[in-house]
Amino acid sequence: MTRRTIAVTVIAIPVLVIALLAAMIVFGTAAPPRVTAPSVQSDPGALPPLETLPARDGTPLAYRAYPAAGNRLAILVHGSAGTSMHAVAKALQAAGVGSYALDVRGHGGTGTAGDIAYVGQLDDDLADFASQIRRRHPAAKVALAGFSSGGGFVLRVAGSANGGLFDSYALISPYLGHRAPTQRPDAAEWITPFVPRLIALAVLERIGVHAFEGLPVVALAMVPGKDGAANATYSYRLAKNFTPSEDYRGDFRRATKPIAVVVGGADEVFFADRFAPEIHAVRPDITVLVVPGLGHFDMTTTAAGALAVSEAIVQGLAL
């Protein structure tokens, strides 16, 4: 091989790699899934008014308050299919536990729909929100509970440096990651990842290039403008942040506060019977409750699901 050939090869390979990554970013999308996921938004007339507290960057963090007498509180984190945790909040209220249902940045009334500024911003937002709630209720015990993707995010928090912000955690039908044994292969019926774009952006992230992480990489089966998913997509950075860490088992190991997991026995998105063996392999002390007959969305939209979730939160606050 001549020097000229070697030089051309050395130049051509990076150019081809860059061209391939560019093509994967530009053309690596997919058609959104059909709108089959049920609407999880409660009757707007029944919801408390939307209020806000400031994040460190000045962005108003939207939430709805469900007050109750006493010193037990929960901060509720919705899933990707909507911002309402109304049924759970009402069940908690009936049990004497107040709650704050947060619109996570990129959803509902908080920030830019479908996007955040950087991976980790949701963690910062939650820390800001929790510190202000703590100042309002200095004597309260505070639980953090999340549903589906929000449950995965709550697990991320529990196993992180922010884990001490809360007294207990509840994971409601939590997303543990697409490689977790709990994930059903047919869950793509309501969410479509843009796989080529995801791969390209992950490669760029590893070499320190973050310029394109605001591009959408996931399409949700949502009607635009409804269910708190105004554009029905997630950017790369939002999709990566609103989830457990890449080492979800490590999240469980690192968590120092009580955790309960609650899932419907008829969950259509996850294998309900696989949560207990997967979690107990690393944390046998964690309570895993399977509620017979309830599907994925039933856990936060039906009276039976909301009651099971509220009981798990109440028990966690009692520890």
Image: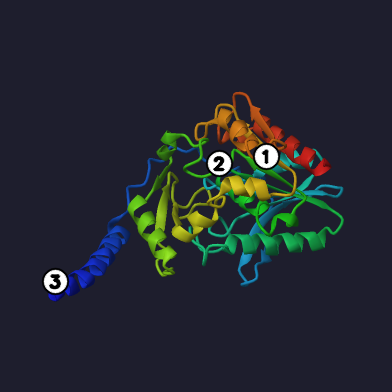
Q: Position of residue 112 (x, y in %)?
A: 51, 63
The residue at 66%/46% (across/down) is 253
Kind of residue indicated by mark 2: Val
Q: Quadrant of residue 42?
A: top right
Count neighbours of disc 2 (C-alpha within 10 A) and say few if under 14, some if 14 to 19, many if 20 or more: many
Q: Position of residue 287 (x, y in %)?
A: 71, 35
Q: What element carries label 2?
A: loop
Count neighbours of disc 3 (C-alpha within 10 A) and say few if under 14, some if 14 to 19, many if 20 or more: few
Residue 23 visible in this rendered orientation of the protein: yes
Seen in the picture, residue 146 relative to 183 is either above or below; the reply is below
Q: Is mark 1 on a helix, strand or loop?
A: loop
Mark positioned earlier in the residue sequence (1 or 2): 2
Question: Which residue was labeled with disc 2?
Answer: 40
| Cα distance in 3D space between marks 2 and 3 | 61 Å
Of badges 2 and 3, nearer the viewer stands 3
Kind of residue indicated by mark 3: Thr
